[in-house]
Amino acid sequence: MAGRSVVVGVGHYLPERIVPNSEFEETLDTTDEWIKSRSGIERRHFAAEDENTSDLATNAAEAALADAGLTADDIDAIVLATSTADLTFPSAATMVQARLGMTKGFAFDVQAVCAGFVFALSNANALIVSGQAKRVLVIGAETFSRIMDWSDRSTCVLFGDGAGALILELQDGAGTAQDRGILATDLNSDGRYKDLLYVDGGVSTQSTGHLRMQGNQVFRHAVEKLTKTAETALERAGLGNADVDWIVPHQANIRIIQGTAKKMGLPMENVVVTVQDHGNTSAASIPLALSVAKQRGQIKQDDLIVTEAIGGGLAWGSVVLRW
Ligand code: ACO
């Protein structure tokens, strides 16, 4: 027997405003064609001025609770992945906790940029299997539109806002790779690569700052590191690439997604792709993709899923789970 963290609910929220690539043609030296062909992105959502990360996160959390048929009283902990919290403190997670009317348990944020949701899932799983919580709400929520330099065409066309959430619940498993729930995780970071992707401001440097990225350098690391982390987690679970029903990758660039699937020897029919509609929503992209994939009827119970992500840090990792 083994305690497993099983997904019992999933949901997402996207802000109302949809911005097509063509809108950037009005203010920047760029084209819909360039953005589509280099990144796969066609449109993204941007939060309204009075809408903050905790608002997006709360809406996604409510959708996940409804999907699970649970209320906030059933939740022991909230782990929220974000790099764009409303305030320096308190955490966005505790703001969501209050909004949901949850007065017990605990809530905290995790910051690993685009790999944030994978880090949050791994931490939530550790809380569950170590007996510290029975049900954990795991959220990825971002308002990257707030840290864009709107004059930098190489970054501002790539990102979007949104939120997704999962509920993990402790269930008994047989301790085999056929169990439902999280089967293995793999987390990595290497701070020597800070300059490839960072925000040039923050609390201690006394400004908000803007996202700066050497996109082609990040690209160079992405396919190799994502393939390696996915295969490491699969191996830890006692599984191989051929066992995978769905790759649910971080949605940064269709060329990275295709390159990773190819290197893993899997066809694109086994990959969930939402980057065309959401852009790169950083820590929100994987739970958004999981929720959309369930709505589309792609992901079904007992499917084997591998999620993988890389972002600022560099930080990267993957989680293998059976839905
Ligand atoms: N419109 C038109 N031309 C552009 C644009 C644009 N929006 N942006 C850049 N260009 C130009 C560049 O100036 C450059 O021109 P030059 O050759 O005259 O200098 C040319 O296009 C090629 O630029 P590259 O950066 O080499 O283009 P590339 O093919 O690498 O695509 C991209 C750029 C889409 C950013 C890609 O490198 C990428 O996706 N990188 C990875 C991003 C990523 O995965 N980040 C990690 C997650 S994000 C996070 O953690 C927050």
Image (cartoon, helix red, strand yellow):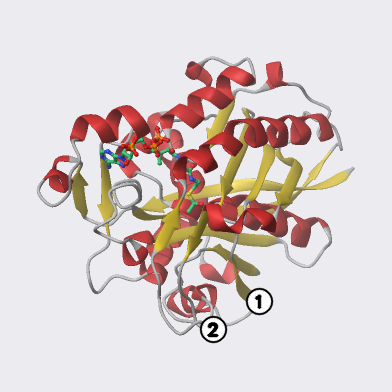
* Quadrant of image for the C terminus: top right
Taking depth in this image into account, of 206 and 159 the one nearest to the observer is 206
Q: Are marks 1 and 2 in contact (CB under 8 Å)?
A: no
Which residue matches tag 2? 204
Image quarter for residue 148?
bottom left
- Extreme residue in the right direction: 1
Image quarter for residue 107?
bottom right
| Residue 118 placement (x, y as % from top left) | 62, 50
Taking depth in this image into account, of 294 and 218 the one nearest to the observer is 218
- Using the rendered image of the protein, determine whether residue 281 is visible from the camera's viewpoint: yes
Which callout, 1 or 2, points at the residue further toward the start of the chain? 1
For marks 1 and 2, give the CA distance.
30 Å
* Side (left or right) of 127 relative to 143: right
Tell me the element at label 1: loop
Residue at 14 percent across and 46 percent down: it is: 23
- Asked if residue 140 is positioned above or below residue 210 in the image, the reply reads above
- Using the rendered image of the protein, determine whether residue 323 is visible from the camera's viewpoint: no
- Which numbered dot is residue 192? none
Q: Nearer the viewer, mark 1 or mark 2?
A: 2
| Residue 68 placement (x, y as % from top left) | 52, 51
- Asked if residue 115 is positioned above or below residue 146 in the image, the reply reads above
Mark 2 closeness class: few <14, some 14–19, many ≥20 residues within 10 Å: few
* Side (left or right) of 114 relative to 131: left
- Asked if residue 242 is positioned above or below residue 208 in the image, the reply reads above
Tell me the element at label 2: loop
| Residue 299 placement (x, y as % from top left) | 51, 30
Residue at 27 percent across and 62 percent down: it is: 47
Which residue matches tag 1? 105
* Quadrant of image for the N terminus: top right
Three-letter amino acid code at the position of disc 2: Ser
* Side (left or right) of 212 relative to 46: right
Taking depth in this image into account, of 169 and 57 the one nearest to the observer is 57
